[in-house]
């Protein structure tokens, strides 16, 4: 566990599970291009975790799946 994981704000169990899925607080923040030592970035990451915990993650994750399905239907991504 990186030392910056200790800088995470208090998280609800649902938020903690979201963050855990990313490998911890530091990895969660890095995945969104946020810096773990910047208080504004910490606040932004916490808001992202809240949104995902409230069900917003399903919508965000659905986009790449839809694009993959569209590419498959159009024959995209296949080697010739």
Image: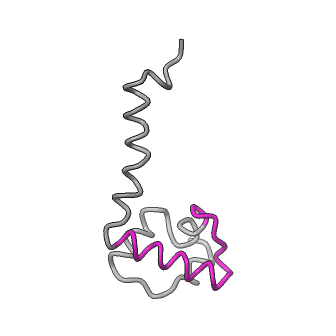
Against 43, residue 32 (above or below) is above
Membership of 72 in magenta stretch = no
The answer to whether 71 is drawn above or below residue 38 in the figure is: above
Image quadrant occupied by the N terminus: bottom right
Residue occupying image coordinates x 40% and y 53%: 61
- Relative image position of residue 70 (x, y in whole percent): 39, 33
The quadrant the C terminus occupies is: top right
In the image, residue 30 lies at what x, y percent? Answer: 61, 65
* Quarter of the image where one finds residue 7: bottom right
Residue at (36, 83) in percent of width and height = 12
The image quarter in which residue 53 lies: bottom left
> With 72 as the anchor, is 8 left or right in this view?
right
Q: Nearer the viewer, residue 20 or 46?
A: 46
Magenta residues (range): 30-53
Q: Is residue 72 above or below residue 18?
A: above
Q: Main secondary structure of the magenta part?
A: helix
When asked about the image quadrant of residue 17, the answer is bottom left
Give yes or no for residue 39 being in the magenta stretch. yes
């Amino acid at each position: 566990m990186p030392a910056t994981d200790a800088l995470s704000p208090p998280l609800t169990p649902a938020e903690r599970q979201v963050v855990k899925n990313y490998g911890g607080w530091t990895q969660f923040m890095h995945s969104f291009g946020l810096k773990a030592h910047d208080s504004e970035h910490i606040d932004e990451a916490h808001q992202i975790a809240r949104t995902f915990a409230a069900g917003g993650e399903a919508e965000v994750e659905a986009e790449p799946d839809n694009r993959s399905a569209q590419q498959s239907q159009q024959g995209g991504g296949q080697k010739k």
